Image: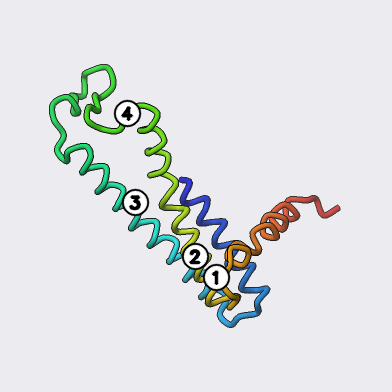
Amino acid sequence: MIGGIIMIFVVLWMWQSATKAKVDNVIMWVAIGAVVFFVVQTLLVQANVYILEAVRGGEADAGYERDLTSIGDRKNIGGFQGVGGALLSIFFELMPPFAGFLAAAFVRLKFITKESFSVGNLFGGIKEMFVSIKESFKNPQ
């Protein structure tokens, strides 16, 4: 869900950057940015699943599985627990969409705007995108 929302912002950002840079085939570059975002996010989600399965031990035991009539939660013994486990879970949740965003930003920087690599150029245009989104909700009266 978080990745989907970020993907929408990435597509809008790519569209706005491509139209401002007056590149040919704006829709193609927006699609390339969305595909790069999606592929990087998918690969990192699969890597996260692999890491979590390796830490958990791979196979579910009787303490993990429960039958349909039982009441209560599953016992996730051997997994991530405590504050460190919560922070690691948040990291595993947010890392794939953020890495996808960075990959799409790199494509935008090198192929659409053709600017030199810097942090300011990498994230340039995001503020303008949110301002234009805000302006689109204003009443035209």
**Residue assigned mark 2:** 104
Amino acid at dot 4: Gln
| Earlier residue among tags 3 and 1 | 3
Query: Where's residue 14, x and y in %?
Result: 57, 67
Callout 3 crowding tier (Cα within 10 Å): few <14, some 14–19, many ≥20: some
Three-letter residue code for mark 1: Arg
Residue identifier under label 1:
108
* Camera-side mark, 4 or 3: 4
User: From the viewer's perspective, is 139 left or right of 56?
Assistant: right
- Chain-order first, disc 4 or disc 3: 3
Name the kind of residue labelled 3 in the image.
Val
User: Alpha-carbon distance for marks 1 and 2?
Assistant: 6 Å
User: Secondary structure under badge 3?
Assistant: helix
Which percent across, then down, holds residue 130? 68, 55
Q: Compared with residue 133, is residue 22 higher up or lower down, i.e. above or below?
A: below
Task: Name the secondary structure under disc 1.
Answer: helix
Q: Residue, x 65% and y 74% (percent of image)? A: 19
Q: Is residue 48 left or right of residue 10?
A: left
Q: Residue at x 61, y 73 (%)?
A: 18
The reply to whether discs 1 and 2 touch (Cβ–Cβ < 8 Å) is yes
Please identify, in this view, whether the residue under mark 2 or under mark 4 is nearer the observer.
4
Check residue 45 in the rendering and tell me which mark sits there, or answer none: 3
Report the label total: 4
Separation of marks 4 and 3 at Cα, in angstroms: 20 Å
Earlier-in-chain disc, 2 versus 4 = 4
Left or right? Give the position of 116 relative to 60: right
Between the residue at mark 3 and the residue at mark 1, the CA separation in whole angstroms equals 23 Å
Q: Residues within 10 Å of mark 1 (few under 14, many from 20)?
A: many
Residue placed under numbered mark 4 in the picture: 81
Alpha-carbon span between mark 2 and mark 4: 33 Å
